[in-house]
Amino acid sequence: MYGALSTEQYLDATAAGAGAMTDALANHPLDTPVPSCPGWDLGDLGGHLGVVHRWALDSLTSSSPPDEGPPGPREELASWYADSADALLAALRGTDPDTACWGFGPRPRTVRFWLRRQAHETSMHSWDALVAIGREPRIDADVAADGVDEVVSVFYPRQVRLGRRPPLGVALAFSPTDAGGPAVLGEGEAVASLSGPAELLLLGLWRRRDWGRLLDDGLVRLDGDAPAARAVLAQAHTP
C-alpha cells in the first residue's frame, strides 16, 4: 500500500500543483531564478517537471524504466507543460490504481506509487515556482505528512540501496503536529524526535528550509539526543 491519502487526494494535489506551475510559466519570465533549486531558473524547473510527468506517464504502461525525453521548447513551455500534466492526470484517473507497472519504490509496484509520487513531486516543485515569483505558498498538512512518510519509507532507503549514501546507523522520528502520525528515519529505535507542522518537516527534509533556523526559531521542537539529531539533519536523505 502506497501512502495514507485517497486516490482523489493525490489527484487533487497533483492538479493543484500543476495549475500553479502552468500559471507561473505563462505569466512570469522564464529566466526568473529559483532560489530553492540553485542554478535553475523558472524555465528549467518547468521543463524538469514536465519531463518527469511524461516519464511517469510512460511508466504506467511499462515493466522497466522508460527513457526520459527532452523538455519542450522554452517559447512554448507553458502550453507544453500543461499538456504534459493533463496527459498524466488523465491516465492516472483512467487507470486502476492496482495495475502493475514499473516504479522505484517497494514492491508490489503499481500505479499507486505514481499517484503518490506525482502528487508530492508536483506539490514541491510548484512550491519552488511560487516562491521564485514572490508568493507565499502552503502545502496542505495531510499532503505534507504523507510526504514526510514518503521520504523516510521510500527515498532514504532507495538512496542507501543505490549506494548514494551510507546507512545512518541511528534513527530520528518526525512527528507532525497537524496531520498524520510519526515517521521514523534511519535504523533502530529513535534517539530523538522532531515535532512541528507537517509542511515545515517536509520542507526541511527536502532542504527547502534550514533545520537550524527552524529549531532556533522554535518552529520545530527537538526532544531527545540533540547532537545525534542535528548530525542526522545535516545530511541529505533525498536526491
Image: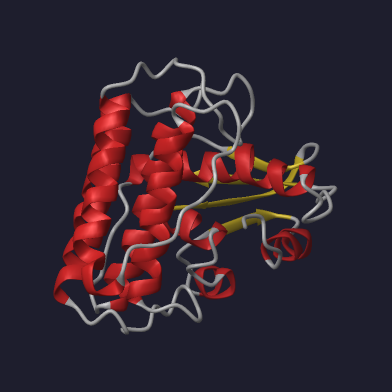
Left or right: 50 with respect to 229? left
Whether residue 44 is visible here, answered yes or no, is: yes
Q: Nearer the viewer, residue 147 or 27?
A: 27
Q: Position of residue 126 (x, y in %)?
A: 31, 60
Residue 178 shows in this picture: no
- Name which residue lies at 44% across and 51% down: 52
Give the image quarter of residue 32. bottom left
Residue drawn 63% across the image and 22% down it: 107
In the rendered image, the quadrant that contains the C terminus is bottom right
Q: Position of residue 171 (x, y in %)?
A: 75, 45
Q: Is residue 51 left or right of residue 127?
A: right
- Residue at 49% of width from left, 69% of height from top? 209
The front one of 146 and 24 is 24
- How many numbered callouts? 0
In the picture, residue 222 is in which quadrant? bottom right
Residue that appears at 29% across and 73% down: 74
The answer to whether 45 is drawn above or below residue 38 in the figure is: above
